[in-house]
Image: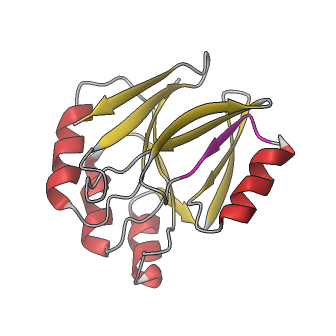
Amino acid sequence: MKAVIISDTHDNIFAIDDFIKSVENEDFEILIHAGDIVAPFSLRKFEKIPCKKYFVFGNNDGEKKILREIAQKSNITLDDVLELNLNKKKILIYHGTYKSLLDGIIKSEIYDIVIYGHTHRLEITKRGKSLIINPGELCGYLTGNKTYVILDLKTLDTKVVKI
């Protein structure tokens, strides 16, 4: 079972379109977005990807009521924080807005995988028993890099893809 992990799209429609083209031939069952979708028109772009979708809000997501309505109609699970059990792995998805909260979650070692965004910096590390993943930014606004991560939920192998 594979998951594609993105974050910080920040309404960059061109980057979202490039991402959708990039994953057309990828074999994955789950799409995870670690926040900062921003506007409803961006969320609608993800409707056409045929997989389970788990998204969390980021600190720049406006119009949360409309985003929730679109997500519900599109079978996208969307919340402030998500706790999932996938392939016998306990996963937490949180945007990472509050660093002290994120650090506490990671330090607790409750989760096999912690996924976050917010910093726009790619990070894949192991801390204690937890695999920590920040896929970087898909928008490319701060770093100039548009990245996402493919995670094999069985082996915990990761692959960084730059578009």
> In this view of the protein, which residue sits in the foreground, 108 or 156?
108
Residue at x-position 50% and y-position 28%:
151
* Residue 50 visible at all: no
- Number of numbered discs: 0
User: In the rendered image of this protein, does residue 154 appear above or below residue 78?
Assistant: above
The answer to which quarter of the image holds residue 132 is top right
* Residue 153 visible at all: yes
Q: Does the magenta segment cover residue 15?
A: no
Where's residue 12, x and y in %?
A: 21, 61
Q: Does the magenta segment cover residue 113?
A: yes
Residue at x-position 36% and y-position 51%:
137
Q: Which residues are magenta?
A: 111-116
> In this view of the protein, which residue sits in the foreground, 72 or 23?
23
> In this view of the protein, which residue sits in the foreground, 85 or 139?
139
User: In the rendered image of this protein, does residue 9 appear above or below residue 70?
Assistant: above
Determine whether, in the image, residue 95 is placed left or right of residue 83: left
The answer to which quarter of the image holds residue 44 is bottom left
Where's residue 125, x and y in %?
A: 61, 32
Residue at x-position 43% and y-position 75%:
61
